Image: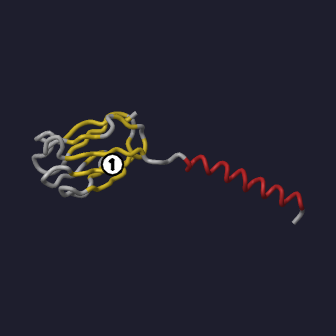
Amino acid sequence: MTKTRIVLLLSVAVALLLWAVPATAGTRATVVTVTAGKPSEFKFTLSRSSVPHGAVTFKIKNAGTVPHNFKIGGKTSPMVNPGATKTITVTLKAGKAPYLCTVPGHAAAGMKGVLTVK
């Protein structure tokens, strides 16, 4: 291989790396802590009322006395027993993202709301 070809191949390799790194560097999920069952058994408290669009990780902690779950963006967490924590990650588009507990009767009792996605 000639010196010119080696330089050309190295230049192409560097260009590809520089092109690929920015595409993956900023893909961290926004984190929202969701507390279920506090201040009352059938209430959610979110650490944020709005999030940027994209990947959002929800850390669901059950501070209540009965099992709950958390549904948002078409994804539902596993059942979260009292004192336990579960995590789900959802990709959200800009707009309003309704959330709720799918345990029968819980949403009707107040375990629901809307998250603003910017």
Residue 85 versus residue 114 in the image, above or below: below
Residue 7 versus residue 98 in the image, above or below: below
Q: Image check: 115 left or right of 44?
A: right
Instruction: Tell me the residue at 83%/56% (across/down).
Output: 7
Q: Amino acid at mark 1?
A: Phe
Percent position of residue 56, x then y? 38, 46
Instruction: Tell me the residue at 21%/47% (across/down).
Output: 36
Instruction: Tell me the residue at 18%/56% (across/down).
Output: 82
Q: Image check: 98 left or right of 11?
A: left
User: Which one is nearer the viewer's eye here, 64 or 7?
Assistant: 64
Q: Image check: 73 left or right of 79?
A: right
Percent position of residue 5, x then y? 85, 59
User: Which one is nearer the viewer's eye here, 56 or 62?
Assistant: 62
**Quadrant of image for the N terminus:** bottom right
Q: Secondary structure at mark 1?
A: strand
Q: Image check: 17 left or right of 50?
A: right
Percent position of residue 40, x then y? 14, 42
Q: Which residue is denoted by mark 1 in the rendering?
A: 58
Q: In which quarter of the view is residue 112 placed? A: top left
Mark 1 is surrounded, within 10 Å at the Cα level, by few (under 14), some (14 to 19) or many (20 or more) other residues, namely: many
Instruction: Tell me the residue at 34%/44% (across/down).
Output: 32
Q: In which quarter of the view is residue 42 placed? A: top left
User: Which one is nearer the viewer's eye here, 13 or 25?
Assistant: 25
**Quadrant of image for the C terminus:** top left
Percent position of residue 68, x then y? 18, 52
